Amino acid sequence: MADLLGIGVSGLSASQSAISTTGNNISNANTAGYSRQRVELTPQPAQYNGAGYIGSGVKVASVQRVVDQFYIGQLRSDTATFNELDSYTTQISQLDSLLADQSTGLSPSLQQFFSDVQQASQDPTSVPVRQVVLSDAGSLAQRFSTLNERLQSLSQSVNQQFSAQTSQATTLAQSIAKINQDIVNQSGGTGAQPNSLLDQREELVRQLSEIVGVNVVPQSDGMVNVFMGNGQPLVIGNRASTMGTRTSTTDPSQQVITLQSGGNGAAVDVTQYTTGGTLGGLVKFQNGTLNNAFNSLGQIAITFSDAVNTQHKLGVDLNGNAGTNLFTDINSPASMTSRALRASTNTGTEQPSVFISNASALTTSDYKLSFTSATAYTLTRISDSTVVNSGTLTAGQTTIPASGATDGFQVQISATPSFAAGDTFAIQPTRLGAQNIAVSLQDPKQLALAQPVRTDANLANTGGGAISQGVMVPQYQAATAGTTLAVANPLTTPLLVRFTSATTYQVLNNTNPAAPAAFVPALTGTFTTGQNNVVQINNASGVPSYQFTLSGNPATGDQFSIAANTSGTSDNRNALALANLNLSKAVGGLTMSDAYGKMVSDIGATTASLKNNRDAANTLLTQAQSNRDSVSAVNLDEEAANLIKFQQAYSASAQVISIARTLFTTLLGAFQ
């Protein structure tokens, strides 16, 4: 009877454990991260009675979670991927809306400015029309500034999210480390697993993967180690690292992500290793799209203002004065200094500046200037990691490179620079271009819409020769073909071109039109019939001043005069030249409007691609969650069926005990 009673009791106990586990599953059906549990039963050792082995009942071997580690790992990976794409898409969508919107974008203001200049060319003496040009120039400068401010707001938002996300990641890492220790404590060497703690830990790791991509490595004692990036430790056993932020050593406007392992030692910059999760998406947006948007907008602003200023200074205003800068000088001392950012870790005291020599050659990349000694330097273009210049400073060298320019700029240093080994500088030629642009002129009469040089043909000419209106020539636009002549003061010296034959001419000083004087040595040129013959007038130092074109079929003795245009009235040639800048391919081979359009188009295409990738990642995440749930989630119908099954087993075991009791009572009665 004792054996039968023991068998019944063991069955009763096993069924009770199964019912309790099933009830627990039902209770936690909606608990996040909960994995259903099942009771593992095993027979108790059979007893030999002479005729054979008779079973002695059942025992509970363990209570196990029903999990598939492959599905759990896939869920973590897909969670990190989706959140990275979702974060990136959210940020870039704001940028796309900002730049593409007609009310906030740059294109309408840019087109309006050039339209105003075109309108002014039709009535160059009208002060009200000139005032419209100045007003819309101010509106355009303000639009550049507003867009830059909005980009800065996005940058500040990213910085704030860095802080919030790293704080949350630290909290999760600390919780995982604590549960690691609790798991070891509760296991207590028994080998039994604390299922609830394991579920909690897995859910915390999944939540952590929403913030940053992680790898999980189990330890033999039941703890897990959690790593990010290229192996940076977030959790090692029962110790958690601290994630945080700090101001970038090279760019005070940006925050970087730091990691302090185990709460000891220095916080290390791990921004470049931060991938996956919300933080990974924010890092990609900040270091890629946002920084490129700053630089692209700045490149357009610098190229635009430089081109307008250069052309404007080649004209004369209504007062007969030479044109000045319409917009702020791109190479003002403050602008030049702001383009070179010292690393806060530098030990040298040198502060370089950046001079833009050719705005059309600028790129949208930032650069890094680093020193391995007080004189050995390397200048690297960050966008493609190309070393664009390197060398050793020589005595008296004041520019990097020593001569010429790199990508349209040069770094200026003092004649006796004080660099030190390890010094680095962030060189940002275009980053603040949109912030620094502003209108310099206030008086509409100072708009230089006329050209300072005029030409005329002698009425007594007998040939069919012609001379174009003279135009001023910036150095970088100097004619590459034709006759080049040097005059001491070209703009103050009236000239006379006299053909000595149908194919040759001389240039005379026409200060006294009654008796033009020859230059010593003589200035002569050769004329080719049937083509435009460019004549460029340089000053005595060889610097281009202005140029004109001779064409047609001149005859011997034909004369053409060139003189300063002392009055800016009734002359719209420089206004037309300013309006034509809209067609100039000065921004990386594109017009200013096309460059902005390309910028908007590229961001729009990236946004559309990211949305598609995010949707695909969401589908994969849903599938991964479904796969995990198909194994580990609680199925209430299945649990209800199990509850009935285990209840029946419990009742049957109770019946076995009842029979054992009856038999025992009968047996006792036989001996009375």
Image (spheres, rainbow, N blue to C red):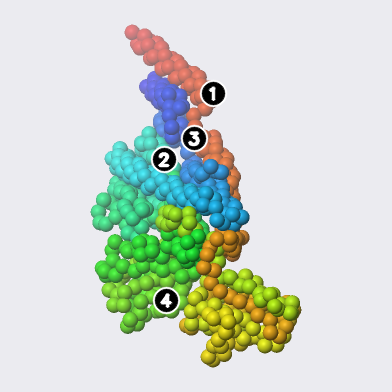
Pointer 2 residue: 207
Give residue 49's position: percent from left, percent from top. 42, 30
Label 2 vs label 3, nearer the camera: 2
**Which residue is at 68% across, 75% downward?**
459
Label 4 vs label 2, nearer the camera: 4
* Amino acid carrying mark 2 in the image: Gln
Label 1 vs label 4, nearer the camera: 4
Mark 2 / mark 1, whichever is N-terminal: 2
**Which residue is at 44% across, 54% downward?**
443
Q: Give the camera-side residue of 514 and 259.
A: 514
Q: Looking at the image, do the residues carrying marks 2 and 3 touch, with CB atoms under 8 Å apart?
A: no
* Amino acid carrying mark 1 in the image: Asp
Mark 1 / mark 4, whichever is N-terminal: 4
Within 10 Å of disc 3 (Cα), the crowding (few <14, some 14-19, many 20+) is many
Numbered label attached to residue 637: 1
Mark 3 / mark 4, whichever is N-terminal: 4
Pointer 4 residue: 401
* Amino acid carrying mark 3 in the image: Ser
Q: Give the camera-side residue of 641 and 355.
A: 355
* SS label for mark 2: helix
Give residue 656's position: percent from left, percent from top. 44, 18
Numbered label attached to residue 173: none
* Amino acid carrying mark 4 in the image: Pro
* SS label for mark 3: helix
Instruction: Quote the CA–CA distance across marks 2 and 3.
Output: 18 Å
* SS label for mark 4: loop
Mark 1 / mark 3, whichever is N-terminal: 3
Numbered label attached to residue 632: 3
* SS label for mark 1: helix
